[in-house]
Amino acid sequence: MSRQQRGPARLIAGAVLLAVCGTVLVGVGMGEVGNGAASLPTTASPDVPPAPVAAPHPELAGASPTSPGPSPASPPAPAVTAGRPATNLPPPLSGPGADPVVQRAVEDAVPPDLPPDIEEEVAQLGRRVWLAEVTGAGRDQWPGYFLPAPARSSFYTRVRVQAAIGRRDPDGPGVVAHLVWAGAGPSGTYMDGRSATVRFIRKGETGTWTPQR
């Protein structure tokens, strides 16, 4: 028999030998079960290699099935357009004394992505523009934003901005102020934890942030 013929023959013989051994082992195992044997072998067969562990997909390499849930210091769900749900906020109608807690929660919900000075500038501008939006006072500072509209007989009263942050606008080239505020509507119903956003772009000729609808 040639060397090329002996190679496949050896493979076939090996396969037959493994099949015979497997049949004998299965027969012995069935006999033990039939005789009510309760003991199990304490050592694994040295011929069976351990099952390989699959490598994680590159996109999921940083994820863990037991990773912790959202941070407890998160803002109200409507307070930001993208963030984590709130779990550690003060009860409704807690008053101005609880506003610092709301501020920290909103800050924790969306990581800072602007230089601190710009972040503060956008947050303060957002406060001013939104107060003009809901109270009507100071709208003349942004005539392009508050276009002439039918006169309103009533606005919000007892308005208070509870929290404000400035972040990059995920939907445009500018920035956005995320706000949480409180106030009484035209019907007189007072609520806190209201949410709002005001978007800004920087005007090239002046370098100032201008609110945009």
Image (cartoon, rainbow, N blue to C red):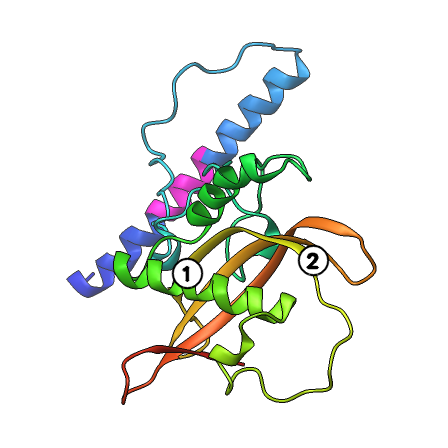
Establish if 71 lies above or below 180: above
* Residue 17 belongs to magenta span: yes
Q: Where the C terminus falls, by quadrant?
A: bottom right
> Is residue 186 found left or right of 156 in the rendered image?
right
Q: Is residue 2 visible?
A: no
Residue 55 % position (x, y): 34, 49
> Is residue 3 found left or right of 181 in the rendered image?
left
Closer to the N terminus: mark 1 or mark 2? 1
Q: As rendered, which of 202 and 125 lies closer to the eye?
A: 125
Residue 209 % position (x, y): 36, 76
Q: Is residue 149 visible?
A: yes
Residue type (three-letter) at the residue carrying disc 2: Thr
Q: Which mark is residue 157?
A: 2
Q: Which residues are magenta?
A: 14-21
Crowding near the residue tagged with mark 2, few <14, some 14–19, many ≥20 C-alpha atoms within 10 Å: some
Which quarter of the figure has residue 149? bottom right
Q: Which mark is residue 124?
A: 1
The secondary structure that dominates the magenta segment is helix
Under tag 1, what secondary structure? helix
Q: Where the N terminus falls, by quadrant?
A: bottom left
Number of dots carrying numbers: 2
